[in-house]
Amino acid sequence: MSGIPGGHDEYRMRIPADRYQALLSRMNEPTTRATGVTPPLDPDGWVDRHGDVLYRYALLRLRDPETSAELVQETFLEAYRTRDAFAGRSTERTWLTAILRHRIIDHLRREQRHRSVPLPDDESRAAISSTFFDSHGRWKKPPADWGGRPEALLEAREFWAIVESCLGRLPNTLSTTFWLREIDGLSGEEVCVAAGISQANLWARLHRARLLLRHCLEKHWFEGGHEESTTGHDRKTQDAPGNDA
Amino acid sequence: MTPRDVRLFYRLMNMHCVDVAPLVSQGLDHELPRAERIAVALHLGICRSCRRYRRQLLLLRSVLAHLGPEVETPPVCLNSTLPPEAREQIKRALQSQNS
């Protein structure tokens, strides 16, 4: 089990290089890096060491405490049953998380089958359009200036609390597919297969999720007065064409 | 050019923000077909709002990367921990696997 699903390479490049290196080295310890020997699994300590993180992982994606606890239990049991297959190529946590993720995907697939048919693309497109765009097709509320220092955000605790809260507000139909694609880094194709939806449906969902999330973040963080002051920053040249990536 | 080409050309040249936003979003996931790519680039050239939107989506993506599965201790503030009953139940279940 390699741990990182396909399609992650493109995704990796978006993480700043120094962060990526830090993540990579954290991920590789404490297995074979130092000694070249696979450390033995320690199931007795699993629940204490990994239980909370796994639970949070599931809860963020499923929003339901009971199902989350259930899937965490299934994960530990499956991991225990298949412990001989753990080749030590990743850390315990990465391995357990991968099992949990597959459980979440299976759960999602089962849910999808019981749920009623999702909105036809035309209807949902119209709904999202009228929320954010006027009758001329222009932004009702144009995206605001988020200031010049996005890196500063990552250090702020309140920012993460708002990110989490905004993610939590995503409607259930959008939430899990968004998580799988955007946060777990599954490729578009993998998400389509996992969720049993068409590619067009996936893009429509991601589009809606991104519109909603961006809007929520802008409203609660940037307009909540948390933004770093941009006085002294020449806004005119900042937004001129050609200055953007 | 066929009439179909003309219609397509006309449609692409008359894109508004509402048409471009989903393409900007899609462009994050895969390479857009050439015609759409050009139309989006043209629109972004004259529309500050959509330029910002694109920039913000990219920022969002790099922010969300910090919550990804590669991160051992994500910076989340959720204080949720595995409820004690669930914790005990799991431990019991694991122990009964042992015996």
Image (spheres, coloured by chain):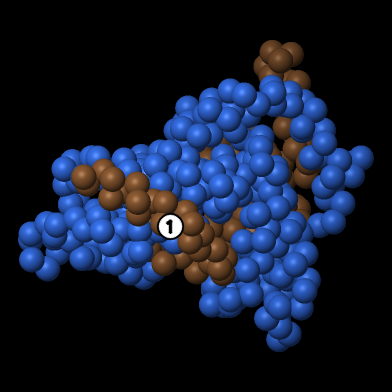
Q: How crowded is mark 1: few (under 14 residues within 10 Å), some or many (20 or more)?
A: some
Picture residue at 59% right of the left edge, 58% below the top = B60
Picture residue at 45% right of the left edge, 43% below the top = A71
Percent x, y of residue A8: 39, 46
Percent x, y of residue A20: 36, 64
Return the residue at label 1. B87
Rendered-image quadrant of the N terminus of chain A: top left
Q: Which chain carries label 1?
A: B
**Secondary structure category for the residue under label 1:** helix
Picture residue at 47% right of the left edge, 27% below the top = A193
Q: Which of A53 and A6 is in front in this view?
A: A53
Q: Is residue B67 visible?
A: no
Farthest residue in the left direction?
A36
Q: Is residue A165 visible?
A: yes
A105 horizontally vs A230: left or right: left
Query: How many numbered marks, from 0 up?
Result: 1
- Identify the chain drawn in brown: B
A88 horizontally vs A215: left or right: left
Query: Residue type at mark 1?
Result: Arg
Percent x, y of residue A63: 61, 49
Q: Which of A100 and A191 is in front in this view?
A: A100
Percent x, y of residue A54: 43, 55
Task: Answer with the quarter of the image where residue B61 lies.
Answer: bottom right
Rendered-image quadrant of the C terminus of chain A: bottom right
A112 horizontally vs A57: left or right: right
Farthest residue in the bottom direction?
A232
Q: Which of B33 and A143 is in front in this view?
A: A143
Q: In this view, does A149 lie above or below B96?
A: below
Q: Nearer the viewer, residue A226 or B99?
A: B99
Q: Which color has been applied to chain A in this rendered view?
A: blue
Picture residue at 66% right of the left edge, 54% below the top = A168
